[in-house]
Amino acid sequence: QEGTKIPSKRKQNTSITSSELSYKNLLKSEQENWNDISARYKAMTKRITEKLEELHKYTFNSGSPRIRFGENVYFEENGCIFLSKADDADEGNVDVLFSTEDLGFSDAFIQRIRISPDQRYMAISLKSENSEEATCIIMKLGHFPVVEKVIPNVFSFEWATNDVLYYTSQKNLKCQNVFMTTFTNQKHTKLVYTEQDARFFVDIYCTKDRRFLTINSNSKTTSEVWLVDCRHPFKLPALVQARTKGIIYHIEHRNDELYILTTYGEPAEYKLMKAPVASSGMENWQLVYALEEKTKLVDLEMFSDHCIMFLKNAGHLYLSVISFVSHSVQSIKLPTWACEFELESHPEHTTGTCYFQLTSPVHPPKHFAYSFKENNLIEQAVQEVPIITNCHTTRLLAKSKDETLVPITVFHNMNSKELHRKPLLVHVYGAYGIDLNMSFKEEKLMLIEEGWILAYCHVRGGGELGLSWHKDGCQHNKLKGLHDLKACIMLLHELGFSQPKYTALAAASAGGVLAGALCNTDPELIRAMVLQAPFVDVLNTMMKTHLPLTIEEQEEWGNPLADEKCMKYIKSYCPYQNIKTQCYPSVFITAYENDQRVPLTGILQYVQKLRKAALDHASRTSKKGNRIPNIILDIQANGSHCDSSWEDSLNE
């Protein structure tokens, strides 16, 4: 696959089997090692499991966003989809429309639900945790809902009309084809759009007023949108604006005008613009609203006379409400504890209320509603979780090497006396312009109750302070994220939040790059590191163009094959390349056998090399009290990249 010349057929086969054999042996010895080690933690695991199950009972039902359709409310719970009337959702008068168990999909979870405009059909995607691909099931609703059609390997889908569904198919982590399928008397399916460029990924979205379906083709830095007219779903899609390198845009619609959320123009942050449907080219885009500096746009919801923007600034969440009638903008600050939004789907854009949920790592989702008429925020009463301790939310700024201020969000129990003696768990991600995940997790609440301090470092490379925050931490700026992380941990210790010997660092996926790099450069800052499906072998992975993501990932890490400077730069921070003989923190890694995104071989090699370095150091400096770090690898047979069910994440 790498294009190397192989002298003889026979030789090729033996080399493959011997490397496969050593891989299998390595896998086997790691699994045996894990079985020995995990036995030591049995008692602690049992205690934690009981505690988490207890918390889960209280927090579970507050979740799952609802889909409101006039009087009807659709919601999902425990792998079932229910229908209730808006007023008696809590009275128990509910109909079961769908159950994963009854249809033999017991190991799958429901990912997405789309109801057709006349509520006669419901499309659902089901994903099993062992695969990245989802299956779409179309149900015909009525007194006895029946399965009408099953479509494998689907990523996104939307109803164009009551009986025409558009969907994208997914293969090898790529989405490049859009299909249309009809549920009229003449049932047929046809290919509508194909993306030719491997760096682009296609998904489908329906505008809030259901006037257009948008076919969105996005790379990490550039986008192009095609419109399907829902009144004429069989007509060919129309192009809004041809892709222009470096310009991202998304489309909403209202009163024959397209509202365009785009990075076009200076500064290169998101702004809301508009243009007539008939002449949608960039030369006709007019500015409606520009974001303040260092502000992250999380979501946008369009209504007939208003538009709500969900924004983040320095860790605080707020709403900006634009009125198209009075041409005014209002800013509404949300509770200080809130760290994440989730919008509730309300298919009617004429409604006067916007429903959403707020959550934080230690606050289960709470339902809120914003009324345009009253111009106020209503917290909807939900059964209170009786276990929330008085948790304190603190926001700090750490000064990085180049003087940039980096936000940190800290949670701790207000009764915590002597914070410098408490254990600290630091979280980091810092890639792809994606924010650090701060949605609710039972185990975070449990740690707070047990006196832990939780810190979330919003380093460059992530998206917390807008698009420039990402740009400032990708490709040839990757090291800035590492400097940010170091500055954050040092500030926490300086301010009396714990100390190095009680500090652990947690990261998942691409967050493993910065965490693993810090372990090499400043191992004395932390005592332990927990990684989930970590990307620790950047250089070798980015050299392998046959892997499904390598080409599109070049926009994040650079292309070491074409650019020697880039190769040297990646080599300077890549965790695997920089392991040296020194005292390392203890490390616990969870990896997934079926992971298509982070190859297991890279993780296995990383663990081997790290263990050797730590042992070499210990044998050279056999002083009294010299500790050898625990370096533990748990390879899960189930689960795919960082995506496991509640039961599996509980075991983990």
Image (tube, rainbow, N blue to C red):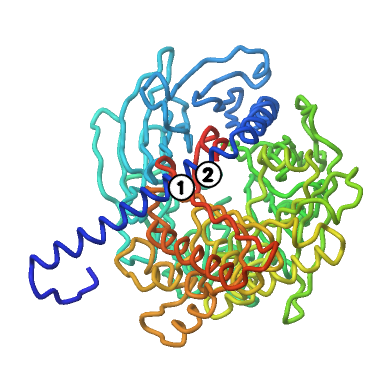
Nearest the viewer among 627 and 126 is 627
User: Residue 149's spot in the image, x, y percent?
Assistant: 31, 29
The amino acid sitting under disc 1 is Asn
**Residue at horizontal 32 percent and vertical 70 percent from the top:** 545
Picture quadrant of residue 303: top right
- Binning the other alpha carbons within 10 Å of mark 1 as few (below 14), some (14 to 19) or many (20 upward) gives some
Image quarter hosting the N terminus: bottom left
Nearest the viewer among 345 and 38 is 38
**Residue at horizontal 46 percent and vertical 87 percent from the top:** 565
Q: Is residue 370 left or right of residue 260?
A: right
Nearest the viewer among 649 and 422 is 422
**Image mark for residue 33:** 1
User: Residue 611's spot in the image, x, y percent?
Assistant: 50, 63
Name above or below for residue 165 compared with residue 264.
Answer: above
- Distance between the alpha carbons at the discs numbered 1 and 2: 6 Å
Q: Which residue is mark 2?
A: 37
- Binning the other alpha carbons within 10 Å of mark 2 as few (below 14), some (14 to 19) or many (20 upward) gives some
**Residue at horizontal 37 percent and vertical 22 percent from the top:** 103
Q: Is residue 516 left or right of residue 486?
A: left
Q: Is residue 228 left or right of residue 47?
A: left
User: Residue 614's spot in the image, x, y percent?
Assistant: 55, 66
Determine whether the residue tagged by mark 2 lies in a helix, strand or loop.
helix
**Residue at horizontal 85 percent and vertical 47 percent from the top:** 392
Residue contact at pointers 1 and 2, CB within 8 angstroms: yes
Q: Residue furthest bottom?
A: 565
- Is residue 232 something that shows in the picture? no
The amino acid sitting under disc 2 is Ile
- Is residue 217 something that shows in the picture? yes
Determine whether the residue tagged by mark 1 lies in a helix, strand or loop.
helix
Image quarter hosting the C terminus: top right
**Image mark for residue 369:** none
User: Residue 104's spot in the image, x, y percent?
Assistant: 36, 23
